[in-house]
Image (cartoon, grey):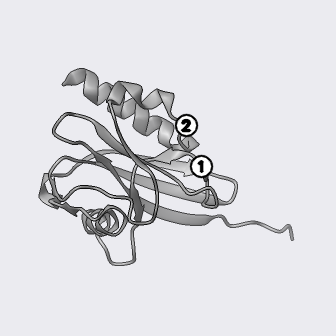
Amino acid sequence: MPNTVVNKRVHVAVGVIFNPKGQILIARRHDDAHQGGVWEFPGGKVESGETVGDALARELHEELGIVVHVSSCTQLLEIRHDYTDKVVLLDVWTVSDFDGEPVGKEGQPLRWVEPQALPEYEFPAANAAIVDAILNLSSQR
């Protein structure tokens, strides 16, 4: 019987956070993290029994110190991406209503960028569709 490798499955809530100027917040992953050294849209794992909105609010508070008004968030897209060591489901939501000023509570650098500047940054492969969706969304505004 052949050995089969079962990849770990991870459900992740991702926030595309807009400021009043229309810029988007990105964070740089720590070098020792999975896909380290590249930029990402903040978020984290959805825990068992947690809604995506609750996970997004919790993760963004833990990582950035902001309080997200979940009722104002809208789903942008879902992405399933197969890495060699894991399968991720990215549940991507826009966030434009929150309290507080984002800070890298885990020591991660943050940057507000114009949507059209996103292609200048290196993101994990799974984020390419997010960048495309943001560029499409921004062209409609």
Tell me the crowding category of disc 1: few under 14, some 14 to 19, or many 20 or more residues within 10 angstroms, Cα based: some
> Of 130 and 63, which appears nearest the observer?
63
Which sits in the foreground, 16 or 132?
16
Badge 1 marks a residue whose secondary structure is loop
**Going 34% across and 69% down the picture, which residue do you hit?**
62
From this view, report whether residue 50 is shown above or below residue 76: below
Q: Quadrant of residue 71?
A: bottom left
**What residue sits 77% from the left and 66% below the top?**
4
- Indicate the position of residue 10 as horizontal and vertical percent values: 51, 64
Q: Amino acid at mark 1?
A: Gly
What is the three-letter code of the residue carrying label 2?
Answer: Glu
In this view, the residue farthest toward the top is 139
Outermost residue on the right side: it is 1
Mark 2, residue position: 122
* Callout 2 secondary element: loop
- Position of 72 relative to 121 (above/below): below
Judge whether 9 appears above or below 129 on screen: below
Of 6 and 117, nearer the camera is 117
